[in-house]
Image (spheres, rainbow, N blue to C red):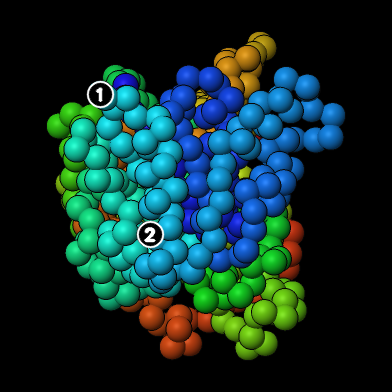
Amino acid sequence: PEKGSLSIVVLGASGDLAKKKTFPALFNLYKQGFLLPDEVCIFGYARSKLTDDDLRNRLRSYLVPGKDAFPELLEKVSKFLLLIKYTSGSYDSEDSFYNLDKEISVHESLKNSTEGSSRRLFYLALPPSVYPSVCKMIKTCCMNKSDLGGWTRIVVEKPFGKDLASAEQLSAQIGKLFEEPQIYRIDHYLGKELVQNMLVLRFANRFFMPQWNRDNIANVQIVFREDFGTEGRGGYFDEYGIIRDIIQNHLLQVFCLIAMEKPVSLKPEHIRDEKVKVLQSVLPIKDDEVVLGQYEGYRDDPTVPKNSNTPTFATVILRVDNERWEGVPFILKAGKALNSRKADIRIQFKDVSGDIFKSKNQGRNEFVIRLQPSEAIYMKLTVKQPGLEMQTVQSELDLSYRQRYQGTTIPEAYERLILDTIRGDQQHFVRRDELKASWEIFTPVLHRIEKGEFKSTPYKRGTRGPAEADKLLLEKAGYVQTQG
Ligand code: BG6
């Protein structure tokens, strides 16, 4: 591991993302004792005038699960909070950023030994509108200046733009100030345990490698459901909609890992090269392969315009124009205020040819990876119904993480990704050309939604979403409903 001081600056420290995700992830790393170096200091930065203790007190309840937490945990929380300092300032003021730089330098001079370098990580838990000015301030005032080496890195959150043009503009603005290896674009789905397992499943198992193609696979579904609406974030959501919020980033990243070719090695650049290639092989989305929905009651939110057409549900079919996947529909589906909270990948295999069992309800083989809740991997397959008759039935080979890995804590996505940023591993971060290719796929549809050329069909809260989506799956994607 690298030596020397580590300064983690959380910009937007009093905001929702920082409180709910960034600081708790940092605490989880700290709690494990060895993942953050002793030479760490965490700097919160935001506009509100707060003292160090104000910020610490605000954060405390996000770090402790309940009132009756174990005393050892409470002690760790208190120690962790003491590592946090607060600086207030605006996002475009050189004075404030020079001030921040001074604070960081004081910490560095206290912690750096002769061999130590200075590491500076800037986490932008901020709306993207301020990214350009904040990046400029960091570049002007706060870069690592140590002669002994070290680095300066920035972490940015989605949304990276609203369409191809705005994303490219943002990338160009940031790209002028920082080199690509310094920029960590977070997509937290890449930090999920079973998303990280995808490459292992595909490329370390003889079972799957020869099957993973158009000869055997009938269709692939990547589904995200939430059983709550956009309460409290209506203003943000209405500007973006479900395609930008979930599909263009989270589900598309999962799609890449399922559909890409085998990378030359596990080096981040090799993996990202393959992701870009498969994104570039996606054909333009067809009009009749999109279904949009909006749950009833969405517009009751005072921050949402009364005539909003923003989709809170979408099903989109992607088609990949290459030798492996020609003719195989990839169904990406996401919705808010549905009947359950679940994210899974379902890979449905083609029917067995020359079926000698003549059992109509036999069902297809399906390989399912449940990302959340309750991580699991299972294969639906046909077996003989135990008993005297020769009857077939669909059953499962089941790997439930909770049972199989009892006692193993599965790390939170943010925790793992922040650790990667400290270690300098970009494998699970989105590269600039990858981002561009992902916007190329969705921008035409998004523009047409904005022009009102695609309408969102209303659906009731707590349902499966619009019936048209199920129809689309049956008619255009050849999906066959299996049991369970
Ligand atoms: C965020 C979206 O990126 O992901 C939210 O903005 C969504 O709308 C969230 O609720 C879902 O993340 P997870 O990890 O709970 O599936």
Q: Which label belongs to residue 115? A: 1
- Where is residue 184 drawn, in percent x and y? 33, 48
Callout 1 crowding tier (Cα within 10 Å): few <14, some 14–19, many ≥20? few
Which quadrant holds residue 287? Answer: bottom left
Q: Residue, x 32% and y 59% (percent of image)?
A: 141
Q: Residue, x 45% and y 68% (percent of image)?
A: 91
Q: What element carries label 2?
A: helix
Q: Which label belongs to residue 349? A: none
Please tell me how many numbered marks the rendered image carries: 2
- Where is residue 280 drawn, in percent x and y? 21, 57
* Alpha carbons under labels 1 and 2: distance apart: 26 Å
Q: Does the residue labelled 1 lie within 8 Å of ligand 1?
A: no
Closest to the observer: 335 or 406? 406
Q: Give the side of residue 32 with respect to residue 339, left or right.
A: left
Q: Which residue, given by chain and number where applicable, does mark 2 sit on?
A: 98
For the N terminus, which image quadrant? top left
Callout 2 crowding tier (Cα within 10 Å): few <14, some 14–19, many ≥20? some
Q: Residue, x 37% and y 36% (percent of image)?
A: 109
Q: What residue type is labelled 1?
A: Glu
Which quadrant holds residue 94? Answer: bottom left
- Where is residue 263 drawn, in percent x and y? 19, 34
Q: Give the side of residue 36 with respect to residue 77, left or right.
A: left
